Image (tube, rainbow, N blue to C red):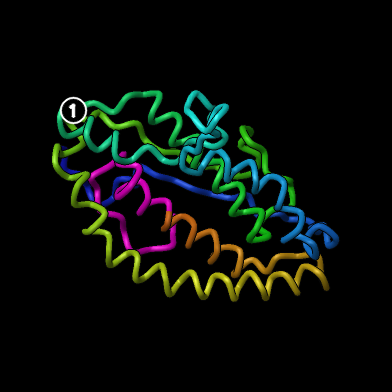
Amino acid sequence: MAAFPPQAQFPATLDVDYPDRELNRATTAFRPFMVIPIGIILMLVSGAAGAEKGAHGHGNGFLWSAGGVLFSATALMIAFRQKYPRWWFDWNLALVRFQTRMAAYVALLRDEYPSTDEPQAIHLDLTYPDVPRDLGRWMPFVKWFLAIPHYLALAVLSIAGVICVLVAWFAILFTGRYPRPYFDFVVGIMRWWLRVMAYAFLLTTDRYPPFTLRA
């Protein structure tokens, strides 16, 4: 497993373009309702698989929902085959990008309606790992536990982030602008969450996430 120099960029990056213009007051005011349609789509691709039974209650039905981050299968592949199938990585990356566009919209960071596939103003990337060189065989089974200090820190920061979003909601309604310090703080929390996800659940890196909001 490679040793990463302290100054190396973490292999999970996120940036959101600051809307240096007036945001839409109407869509901001009704954001909890505006997000419902695309939220249903995200739920369907992020949720566990479900099946409708066929006639007479037997099988041969159809899936109505499937998806989610591929964690367990990826952990087993890394441990026993030292492989991370590229299409599994591409699926995880596309799903996390979609989830992040949704999060940015809910957090009022942008007022473009979230796209299912276009990047828009959200710049998120993960580095595809060279598994034999970059990832330890058995690390996937302990990284979720090693990340506990991050969960605790992010729980507190996320509460502060919700307060910032509420303040920003009022600021946008009255001024049309998202206060830049609050914007940077909320993006920083999202960036920190992404790094923890990349380490503990997306399994794209063994490098321990830094305790920082900065890029």
Q: Mark 1 points at which residue?
A: 82
> Which is more toward the observer, 196 or 31?
31
In this view, 72 is above or below 35: above
Estimate the x, y position of residue 146 in percent, counting from the top left.
21, 59
Estimate the x, y position of residue 174 in percent, counting from the top left.
83, 73
- The residue positioned 76% from the left and 54% from the top of the image is 34
In this view, 151 is above or below 191: below
Which range is magenta? 194-215
> Which is more toward the observer, 207 or 74?
74
| 58 relative position to 128: left or right | right
Quadrant of the rendered image containing residue 148 = bottom left
| 211 relative position to 105: left or right | left
**Magenta stretch holds residue 109:** no
Q: In which quarter of the image is the N terminus?
A: top left
| 157 relative position to 11: left or right | right
Q: How many labels does the image show?
A: 1
| 98 relative position to 194: left or right | right
- The residue positioned 73% from the left and 45% from the top of the image is 113
In this view, 63 is above or below 46: above
Callout 1: few (<14), some (14-19), or many (20+) C-alpha neighbours within 10 Å?
Answer: some
Secondary structure under tag 1 reads: loop
Estimate the x, y position of residue 51 in percent, counting from the top left.
51, 35
> Which is more toward the observer, 184 or 71?
71
- The residue positioned 55% from the left and 64% from the top of the image is 186
| Kind of residue at badge 1 | Gln
Of helix, strand and loop, which mostly describes the magenta segment?
loop
- The residue positioned 14% from the left and 37% from the top of the image is 137
> Which is more toward the observer, 198 or 18?
198
